[in-house]
Image (tube, rainbow, N blue to C red):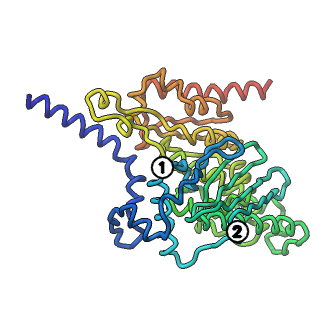
Amino acid sequence: MKTCCRSRLFALLFQISLFVPRLFPLLTHFWTGTSMAKRRPTLSVVELEEELGFQLSQLEVDLSSPAPTGANRLFSNFRPVSTDGIERITKEHEEFLREKRAKRTQSITLRQGESETVQVVDHNHSDFVRLHVRHDHGPGSYRFPVDIHYGFGLNLAFLFSEHEAARVLSTTKLHKRLAMSSTSTPAATTFLSLLPLEIRQSIYKFALAQGVWRMVDDEEFGRDNFPRSIGDPSGFYYPLGKPLSILRVNKQIRKEALPLAYRRTTFCLDSLESATRFLISVGQIGRKNIETLRVAWESTSEPTCTWATAAWSDQALEQLPGKLPSHTVSICIQLLKRCKRLRHLSVQFDSDLVKGMGLDAFRADAGVQGLCTLEGLKTVEIQELGMGPLGSDITRWLEGKMKGASKEEEECNGG
């Protein structure tokens, strides 16, 4: 009897250890942004209502209803907007605390019931983004449905806070004015601009060392950089980082050197949500020039283990792990297909999850099927989350399918 109980305990602890990495994004919501990182005590609904100044019943309007395009609304971190009142008021409280800590926050000029549509075309007139922002009636900050349509066919439906919606509108209008004025303003003459383009390109290559780029603060990226970058479909102003100081010399140098910066950088993204936001934010310039990507096929917004929804039982434990991420996959695949120079792709999976699925379930997964349609890849690596090779029949099958798609494309182009 003791041996049976001990084995069950070990099995339970083992399965929990597999799930711990996925718990981290969820646990961050319980911590404040103070330097001491103290855990804030959980507040009751009554306490939340008192602090926010409105009641839970006032949030009954279903903001998670589909947009005109039929898409489900998402927050800026790509978590689906919940219809659960407790989750909604908790989200409002998180934004309330952020605004209190912030030295300044942006407000919007739209009154309740008003809406505004803005369209921005990039400087090459080869892509555009159309935004429709509406200010819904009711209390709270998350009252701004934002519908986005990209010229290449991607449609997104968000629910933004006032701060995020204000950033979207202000930067969209700013970049629209800059795009209109750039054609009439002559570029300043510098010594570098007098050199032939081939020599300038060689100088840029020396100045732009090959490096690795990682998203430092995913939460702040979603709140600030992501809404701001939506209004810049070209990606010309996307901040790649301080080490690339040559990109800040002037507009001409940035225009000529930015594509090289993307080509010479390996971008590491630790979740599908991070990858999706990043590929939207870098705009057309980034997507056209990225050559090397590492993506963890993990989700921060949906459970991938069945124990999140199943009852604790021997049968439930035997079903662990559960499934691959699903709800942001189609968007991410659509954006990856826009990366026309992408040649080296590394995809990291949870090894225990993949092995537990079986080959048939793995093949049938929509995200895996989407990966098999990517073309132009020269190097494909299917790894575990620790960057080591998975070495299973399942992953060898996926590598073969992805490389096969690229070979078929080469043969078609050659023919």
Looking at the picture, which amino acid does disc 2 mark?
A: Arg
In the shown orientation, is residue 411 left or right of residue 73? Answer: right
In the shown orientation, is residue 341 left or right of residue 62? Answer: right
Q: For the point 46% across and 22% down, which residue is it?
A: 359
Q: Which quadrant of the rendered structure holds the N terminus?
A: top left
Instruction: Provide residue 268's location: percent of width, then percent of height.
Output: 53, 50
Determine whether 152 is above or below 56 in the image: above
Q: Name the residue under label 2.
A: 111
Q: Quarter of the image holding residue 180? A: bottom right
**Dot 1: few (<14), some (14–19), or many (≥20) neighbours within 10 Å?**
few
Instruction: Provide residue 329's location: percent of width, then percent of height.
Output: 58, 39
**Which of the pair 136/131 is nearer the observer?**
136
Q: For the point 45% across and 33% down, which residue is it?
A: 323
Q: Residue 84 carries which label?
A: 1
Determine whether 286 is above or below 193 in the image: above
In the shown orientation, is residue 29 left or right of residue 140? Answer: left
Q: Which mark is residue 133?
A: none
Determine whether 93 is above or below 127 in the image: below
**Which of the pair 73/260 is nearer the observer?**
73
Looking at the picture, which amino acid does disc 1 mark?
A: Asp
In the shown orientation, is residue 58 left or right of residue 391? Answer: right
Instruction: Provide residue 364's location: percent of width, then percent of height.
Output: 53, 24
**Residue with the most extreme front position:** 57
Calculate the distance from the C-alpha at mark 1 to the C-alpha at mark 2: 26 Å
SS label for mark 2: loop
SS label for mark 1: loop
**Which of the pair 202/188 is nearer the observer?**
188
- Tag 1 near tag 2, CB within 8 Å: no
Q: For the point 33% across and 40% down, which residue is it?
A: 18
Q: Earlier in the sequence, mark 1 or mark 2?
A: 1
